[in-house]
Amino acid sequence: MSECIIDFENITSVMVTSKEITFKNNTCKLSVLGGLESHNVIITLRNTNTLYKLYGIKKPFTMLALSIDDKHVFSNLINQILNNKQPPTIK
């Protein structure tokens, strides 16, 4: 179990990809199953953020790999928000 909060202003890009990436010091995976679960979206940040893991472990990152059910809708929505500089509207 891991969690983090990312401000829209801190997002540089959202990329839909399942391409394998190297998990370096600045890259984390947000996943219940850790390395057993694949990712389909990568969020790149301007500034370092913190991923909070079990037992109070904190891991800094600027790239976050995660799995989203409807990856294209997610990516389009985030990119639309970033391009328009408008806060999200929840329906």
Image: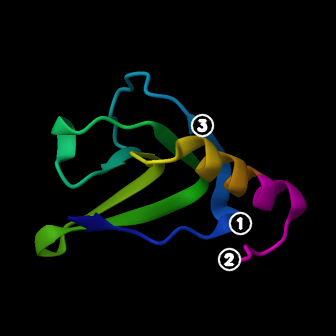
Q: Which residue is mark 2?
A: 91
Q: Residue at x 41, y 45 (%)?
A: 26
Give the Cα distance between marks 2 and 3. 24 Å
The correct choice, above or below, for 40 with respect to 8 in the image is above
Q: Which comes before the other along the chain, label 2 or label 3? A: 3
Residue at far right of view: 84
In front: label 2 or label 1: 2
In front: label 2 or label 3: 2
Q: Residue at x 68, y 49 (%)?
A: 12
Image quarter hosting the N terminus: bottom left
For mark 3, give the secondary structure: strand
Q: Which residue is mark 1?
A: 9
Labelled pair 2, 3 in contact (Cβ < 8 Å): no
| Residue 37 image point, x, y percent | 23, 39
- The answer to which image quadrant residue 90 occupies is bottom right
- Tag shown at residue 75: none
| Residue 70 image point, x, y percent | 51, 47
Give the crowd class for mark 3: few <14, some 14-19, many >=20 residues within 10 Å: some
Labelled pair 3, 1 in contact (Cβ < 8 Å): no
Q: Is residue 62 left or right of residue 51?
A: right
| Residue stretch in magenta | 80-91
For mark 2, give the secondary structure: loop
| Residue 11 image point, x, y percent | 65, 56
Tell me which colouring the rendered structure shows.
Answer: rainbow
Amino acid type for the residue under numbered disc 3:
Met
| Residue 76 image point, x, y percent | 71, 48
Amino acid type for the residue under numbered disc 1:
Glu
Give the crowd class for mark 1: few <14, some 14-19, many >=20 residues within 10 Å: few
Give the Cα distance between marks 3 and 1. 16 Å
Q: Is residue 8 left or right of residue 66?
A: right
Amino acid type for the residue under numbered disc 2:
Lys
